[in-house]
Amino acid sequence: MEKRFHMLRPEQIIEQRDKCPVAYIPLGTLEWHGLHNPIGADGLQAEELALRCANQGGVVFPTVYYGESRVNSLLETDPKYQAGICERLSLNKNQFDADRFPYSGIAQIEHYQHHLIHIISEAASYGFDLVVFVIGHYPLIESARSAIILYNQWAYDKEWKRITGLAAADYLLLKDEYTSPGDHAGGWETSHLLASHPETVNLKAAANELQYGIMSTRNPLHATAQFGNEIYDAAVKKITEHVFLCLNNPKPYMGHGIPLI
């Protein structure tokens, strides 16, 4: 069954919304993930996780790859890695200079939060009761949580029923089940991609002497599709548990100091 909202006809939207009024919003970015993984690794993982959640009910809105700060919390702008990444991408490192972006780092963060608030409102306009941001690029968990809080503050006293919001990142949800959950381009993320998008991974390029810009306790050479499916499914279980708790009893998720998983 098609779960991507933008691929659905009106009668299909109504049918799926009536069954489960949840809109999943995958959040990714474009960022270096080693020579062995695609540049859009974060968004690909977030979308896959959202689709697997939606198989238990709900739909998946288009993945957000753009709009986050391009001068904060990004490997291409990290002084430890920037020169090496630019060399491997055949770029001049000045191309990532902050003054080449028309807005400051803090303005970019604020703009992104505004964009996420707009997306929450857009999902609400289509009649959904719950929006769930599924995080692929880990730093975006803060932006997603902040957007939900700001939306709730704005909508708190409105007469109409407002949409509820949650934000989920697999590495946070699985911290009690796995040692060092999550990583950057290591065995965790590479396993995800082998499970869902194997055509995008080249493990030959993950040879020890080729590895660069990897933050992990797991060597990507040890990545497997089996492990990727295992951790996808473990995260789905955690996320959907929260989703159905929220749907069945939304009040605790809509007050001040709301839980955002």
Image (tube, rainbow, N blue to C red):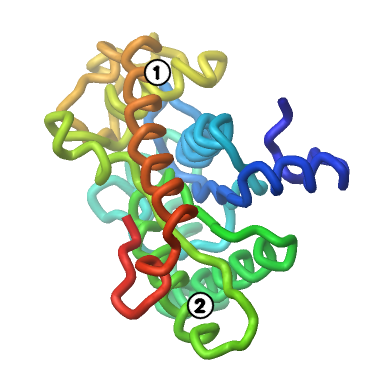
Asked whether 177 or 91 is in front, the reply is 177
Asked whether 158 or 177 is in front, the reply is 158
> Residue shown at 20%/32% (left/top)?
216
Q: Quadrant of residue 249?
A: bottom left
> Residue shown at 37%/54% (left/top)?
74
Q: Is residue 228 visible?
A: yes
Q: Is residue 254 above or below residue 144?
A: below
To which residue does mark 1 refer? 229
- SS at badge 2: helix
* Tag 2: amino acid: Tyr
The answer to which of marks 2 and 1 sits earlier in the sequence is 2
Q: Contact, CB < 8 Å: mark 2 with mark 1?
A: no
In this rendering, would 136 be left or right of 238? right
Q: Position of residue 135 (x, y in %)?
A: 42, 48
Asked whether 235 or 21 is in front, the reply is 21
To which residue does mark 2 refer? 151
Q: Residues within 10 Å of mark 2 (few under 14, many from 20)?
A: many
In this rendering, would 118 be left or right of 32? right
Q: Locate the N terminus and report the quarter of the image it occupies.
A: top right
Q: Position of residue 153 (x, y in %)?
A: 45, 84
> Residue shown at 21%/34% (left/top)?
181
> Residue shown at 66%/66% (left/top)?
124
Q: Position of residue 144 (x, y in %)?
A: 43, 63
* Tag 1: amino acid: Asn
- SS at badge 1: helix
Q: Locate the C terminus and report the quarter of the image it occupies.
A: bottom left
- As drawn, the label of residue 160 is none
In this rendering, would 181 be left or right of 251? left
Task: Measure the alpha-carbon separation of dots 2 and 1.
Answer: 34 Å
Q: Position of residue 118 (x, y in %)?
A: 63, 71
